Amino acid sequence: MAIDKRKNDHIYLAASEISQVGTSWLEEVFLIHNALPEIDLSDVDFSTRFLGVKVNAPFGIGAMTGGTELAGKINAELAKAAEEFGIPIYVGSQRIALMKPEVRWTFEVVKQNAPSVPKVANLGAPQLAELSEEKLAEWVAQAVDMIDAYAVAIHLNPAQEAVQPEGEPRFRGVLEKIKIVKKAAGKPLIVKEVGNGISKEVAARLTGLADAVDVGGFGGTSFVAIEGARASGLHQRAAETFKTWGIPTAASICEVKSAYTGFVIASGGIRGGLDGARAIALGANFFTMSQPFLKAVLEGRLREEIETVATEVKVAMFLTGSRTVQDLASAPRVYGPRLRNWIEQRRLHC
Ligand SMILES: Cc1cc2nc3c(=O)[nH]c(=O)nc-3n(C[C@H](O)[C@H](O)[C@H](O)COP(=O)(O)O)c2cc1C
């Protein structure tokens, strides 16, 4: 019951303004207007590849939920939309279903409703730390099977675990365990943050191990703020202190691009297609959004939300004269002072 309540609390708190902290700094990426794009808007082709698979758009639905009745309904809605638009979909942490087989259906609805798009399984670093090698390999195989996953994501969430009342801030040996996951999965491996970002030092350690890094930067949904809203006493106060902790998404993309040559996924505080286009111009290969799609499901307007994001990406491509996603990646741009300062001090290539 406690874990059910926590999952549903996360959904409702994430959908509320309490969860939204700071900005992604993507507003510091100014794409230069091209008054002579020499293409029609209808020429824009934003289909791309997600870890090698062709998809209809350069964005997907980020990792969120599963494990309760409400989460199952949300996952089914998200999956139907992912299938309709031909975009990838991640699920939330599958630990709950590995411990309680009766809630597997809340994840299985994703493969049932989105049979043809890439689906991404999800486990957390703290579980990696606690499980033996054999058990971990078994869990990974089950998680993949549960949603017919194309890829496996491991989330790193030390800030959340540190302030969560029932948190498990155990990260010793995680890198070695990620190697076991990679072997057991036999699928592309994504390592992601959940809203505090990935630095170049961490990205360098993931080179040759992760097929993709999903930056999960600061500036959108904050699990520190969400845990703070659920906590009292010292946890609540610590959450208040650390709720602005993290690497803003725009800076994290530059951090990761400077140390890692694999596939880079932008996420964290991306709040529309223009933000997504800016993330791609900065160096990301793909982007995901979570909270805006969750809110849209709860408000019964998911398709409209996805269509809006798609239209905005295409307009941004048209206005920079970018016919393809590759063209967008080299669109001229100017950085605002905070991002420029970060790039200089950290000696990033961006
Ligand atoms: C309700 C909710 C639950 C989440 N649960 C998970 C999870 O289980 N595993 C994970 O990797 N990320 C999880 N996330 C984090 C998202 O994948 C993403 O990194 C984060 O929300 C930042 O993106 P956003 O600002 O677009 O929401 C969750 C996000 C939300 C909104």
Image: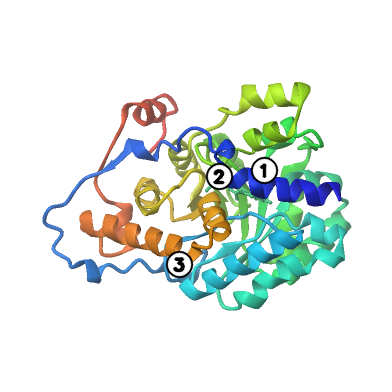
* Residue 344 in the image, given as x and y percentages of width and height: 37, 27
Residue at image position (38%, 31%) is 339
**Which residue position is annotated with label 1?**
156
Residue nearest the observer in this picture, 326 or 336: 336
- Marks 3/1: CA–CA distance: 25 Å
Q: Please, what secondary structure does the residue beneath circle 1 have?
A: strand
Q: Which residue is identified by label 3?
A: 49
Residue nearest the viewer, comparing 213 with 279: 279
Cβ(mark 2) to ligand 1 < 8 Å? yes
Mark 2 or mark 3, whichever is nearer to me:
2
Q: Residue 243 at what x, y percent from top left?
A: 60, 28
Q: Are marks 2 and 1 in contact (CB under 8 Å)?
A: yes
Q: Earlier in the sequence, mark 2 or mark 3?
A: 3
Q: Secondary structure at mark 2?
A: loop
Which residue occupies the foreground of this view, 105 or 49? 105
> Which disc, if any, is residue 216?
2
Q: Residues within 10 Å of mark 3 (few under 14, many from 20)?
A: some
Q: How is the image coloured?
A: rainbow
Q: Is residue 232 left or right of residue 262?
A: right
Q: Position of residue 308 (x, y in %)?
A: 38, 60
Q: Quadrant of residue 80?
A: bottom right
Question: Visible in this render: residue 144?
Answer: no
Mark 1 belongs to which amino acid? Leu
State if disc 3 and disc 2 touch (CB < 8 Å).
Answer: no
At mark 3, the secondary structure is strand
Q: Position of residue 207 (x, y in %)?
A: 58, 48
Mark closer to the chain start, 2 or 1: 1
Q: CA distance from mark 2 to mark 3?
A: 20 Å
